[in-house]
Each structure stands twice: as C-alpha cells, then as structure tokens.
Image (spheres, helix red, strand yellow):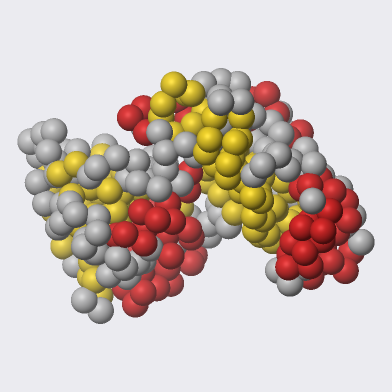
Amino acid sequence: MRRVFLCLLAGFLLFVPGGLAQGGGLDAAFSAIEGLRLAGCGQDVAFFESGAWMSAVVVQSGPIAPMMEGTQVDGLIFEMETGERVGWDDLFIDGDAAAERMEDIAEASIYRNAYGEYDGIRPMPRDSFALLGQQLTVYYPAERLATFSGRSGAFSFYAYELDGLPADGVPLAAGNVDDAAAALLDAYLGGFLPGFLMDWPVGRPMAEARDALGLEDVPNWSLDYALYRFEAPQMRGVTLLSSSDDVNTAVIEGVMAERIDFSGLCTGVTPRAACVAALGEPELVEEISGADAYSRLPDGETLVYQGFGREVRLHFVSDILHSITIS
C-alpha cells in the first residue's frame, strides 16, 4: 500500500497547483487525502485551484460501504500556503443557515428516479465539499445518498443561490453582468454555455456526456427534442437536447439550462429588463402559451439572440429569467 501511494503521489505532483507545492502544504493535503482511502478501492484525485484555495476531489470505486459496491466521491479544500483544511464554518457567515438553504434547494430539485433506497438529503454534509469553477459542490456518503448507478450523491450551487451567505474572502462569486455580451459572443462562436457547460458544446457526441456525467434515465421526449439529464451535480437543472433518443448515435443539438449564471444573468433571479440592458435587443421575440406536459418550456416570453449560425434563447416567466438555451 505504501509503495502504491508513493507512486500515486509522484503522479499527483505533476498536477498539483504550484502554490500548494511551493507553499509547504503538500504533505498536510496528501495526509488528509490518504485518510479517506477505502480498503479495496482504487483512488483517483483531481485538483482545482480557486484563488488562494485548492480543492481536491477524491474518487474511489469498489466496496465503498458494507454490502455496497459503487463509487464514492469526496471533496476537500485546503489553503495553498499552509495546507490547512478549510472547514464549513470558514465558508459561510452562518453555517446553519447555509445548510438549511442548500437542503431546501436540494429537496426541491432532486430527480427521484435517479436515486435508489439511499436518498437522505437532510442534514447536508459539512465535511465533504469542493469549489469547482463557479460552483460549490457538496458530496454525500453513498450510504446516505446514492444513484441507481451506484455513485454517491452530490449537489452543486452557484454563488447566486447562496447570496448573502459566503464569508468574506471565499472565492465564490456571481458573474459580472458587464461580461454578459462577451459571454454571448463566446456562445455563438463555441456553441456552448459558460462555466462547466463549456465542455458540452453543440455537436459533441451524447455518448461522451453519458460516459462522463452519468445518464440519469432514458431520455424523455418533448415536442421537439429528446431530453437527456445527468447525474453529475453540476448538471442540476441542465438538459442536453437531441433529435435522437439513441444515446449511442445522438449528438448534442442544444443545451437548456434552467439553472445557470450567464455572466451575472441568473435564472430565477434576473428580470427581463436587466437581460436586455446587458445583451441588447434580441433578433426575435416569441410568446409561448398553452404549454402542456410535452412542452420543454412553460408559458412565457422568449428572447431569441442570433449570431454566427447559432441561437441563444432566454425564456422568461412573469418577467424573470427562467432558462437559457443554445442551439
């Protein structure tokens, strides 16, 4: 075991953010990671840098709990200068209030068909979390929350969903609306939505998304697309669209996000007027009425922005941004 760990450690050193390696915190960080090791499981670790903090996401597959085979994912955050572990109460001005809000969001958004008998959301874990790009992700032990595929559960949260709760200095902030026009141009040129969704542009094979993100269930059909939803916590509220329900041959033809921070334009929060002020007037405005169970979108108004052969659609319900779709 010691020899295997040393080999892994040598490999990890190639990918550890420089600040941690140079700041003297490497030994403390790897000691904490090794402390998570589950007997009989392989262990992979990925590192993510956020300001002065470094997150480690630890993935272990095998016998993750008594009588349970699957994949356990854990998250740790460290100060890069010292290697000191960042705790829950370091993240928030009120840790209890943060946990309660996150539990409420998780319960309201969970897709029950994706989970087996292990489906306990409350209380929110306070010892396993990571900062990945624009989102804070909290990881559950598999014996409390696990999908039918055998992967431990997790939920990701944008800063705007936790507004007023992060402590000063925490590198988790909502996007800047001044950058929204540039994000729209990037969407036209790259065929993607920002943040985590940049990795899943229009035209990429759906099978690659299945393999990386974990398909929740067979796709449902709307009036215009097959709807693919995924287990990865960053994909909460996100649907990949295709004209085919055969995941092996389908390609991503659209991305619909009912939960997104589009450079400060945030679903469930931002009013129509603020979106137009940031992006300008759209090329088209469409009304949706009489939506039914096969409609992707509820009744409301859609602003259609067009450029470089792409369409970015902002849908509003009661004048508040409901979703953003690129195709």
Report the front residue among 310 and 216: 216
Quarter holding the C terminus is bottom left
Residue 259 location in percent, x, y?
40, 45
Residue 16 location in percent, x, y?
74, 65
* Residue 281 sits in quarter: bottom left
Q: Is residue 299 left or right of residue 84?
A: left
Q: Please name the residue shown 77% across and 64% down the image.
A: 7
In the rendered image, is residue 319 in sight? no
The relative height of residue 164 versus residue 170 in the rendered view (above or below) is above
In the rendered image, is residue 203 in sight? yes
Residue 229 location in percent, x, y?
32, 45
Q: Is residue 47 left or right of residue 30?
A: left
Q: Please name the residue shown 43% across and 65% down the image.
A: 199
Report the front residue among 243 and 184: 243
Q: Is residue 112 left or right of residue 124?
A: left
* Residue 294 sits in quarter: top left
The relative height of residue 290 versus residue 171 in the rendered view (above or below) is above
Residue 324 location in percent, x, y?
31, 53
* Residue 125 sits in quarter: top right
Q: Please name the residue shown 53% across and 59% down the image.
A: 176
Q: Is residue 319 left or right of residue 89?
A: left
Report the front residue among 280 and 152: 152
Q: Please name the residue shown 34% across and 41% down the image.
A: 216
- The total of numbered circles placed on residues is 0
The relative height of residue 236 versus residue 171 in the rendered view (above or below) is above
